[in-house]
Amino acid sequence: MEVEFSRSFRGYNEEEVREFLEEVATQVALLLEEKEKMLQENRELRRKLSEQEEYLRKMQLQLEEWKKQVEVEKELAKRESQMIVKEAQLRAQRIVDEALERKREIEAAYRGLFERYRLFQIRFKSLLQTFIESIEKESLSEEFREEKREEPQEKDEAPEVVRFSLKDLHDEGRMSK
């Protein structure tokens, strides 16, 4: 700031110098005020920055804590899922074992029924054979009787006819059990 003063009897014009000094004083006062405001604003911003940094630090700590908690939860979930899978495998194995046992029981029952069916076939076949033989014997017996009637009868002896019925087969089935 360059200022020129007019010259007077004893140097510079005192009035101009005083006005200049007052203006400089006003400017300095304004600058000091502005400086104080800037310092106050600077302190406020530093305080806010400090608060934000503290808040950020706390958030980072919280975030780290949450990460740890997530890892723990993941591990627990993993273990729980492994236990569920293991239990399911055990149940599945038990179901398979029970099914195989039931299959063996059914196969054994089937073999027993099949054997009883074969026995029934044999007995039924035998029964039918007996009936056929009986019918044939009876038929022969009647022919023989007719022949005997035509011939003089010496002795009336009929061949023994074996009679067999389904009831006999049924009774035999009870006895074999």
Image (spheres, helix red, strand yellow):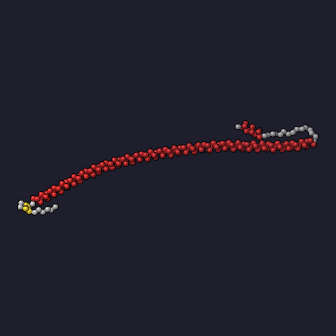
Splitting the image into 4 quarters, where does residue 12 fall? Answer: bottom left
Splitting the image into 4 quarters, where does residue 116 fall? Answer: top right
Q: Is residue 17 left or right of residue 85?
A: left
Which residue is at a point 32% across and 48% down the rendered structure image?
A: 55
As drawn, which residue projects farthest toward the top? 175
Which residue is at a point 50% across and 45% down the rendered structure image?
A: 84
Which residue is at a point 74% across and 44% down the rendered structure image?
A: 121
| Residue 53 coordinates in the image, percent (x, y) | 31, 50
Q: In this view, does 68 lie to the left or right of 97?
A: left
Total number of numbered discs in the rendering: 0
Q: In this view, does 147 lie to the left or right of 39?
A: right
Relative vertical location of residue 1 with respect to residue 166 in this rendering, above or below: below
| Residue 62 coordinates in the image, percent (x, y) | 36, 47
Q: Which image quarter is the C terminus in? A: top right
As drawn, which residue projects farthest toward the front? 15
| Residue 175 coordinates in the image, percent (x, y) | 73, 36
| Residue 43 coordinates in the image, percent (x, y) | 25, 50
As drawn, which residue projects farthest toward the left? 9
Relative vertical location of residue 24 with respect to residue 134 in this rendering, above or below: below
In front here: 162 or 25? 25
In front here: 13 or 171? 13
Q: Which image quarter is the N terminus in? A: bottom left
Q: In this view, does 37 lie to the left or right of 3?
A: right
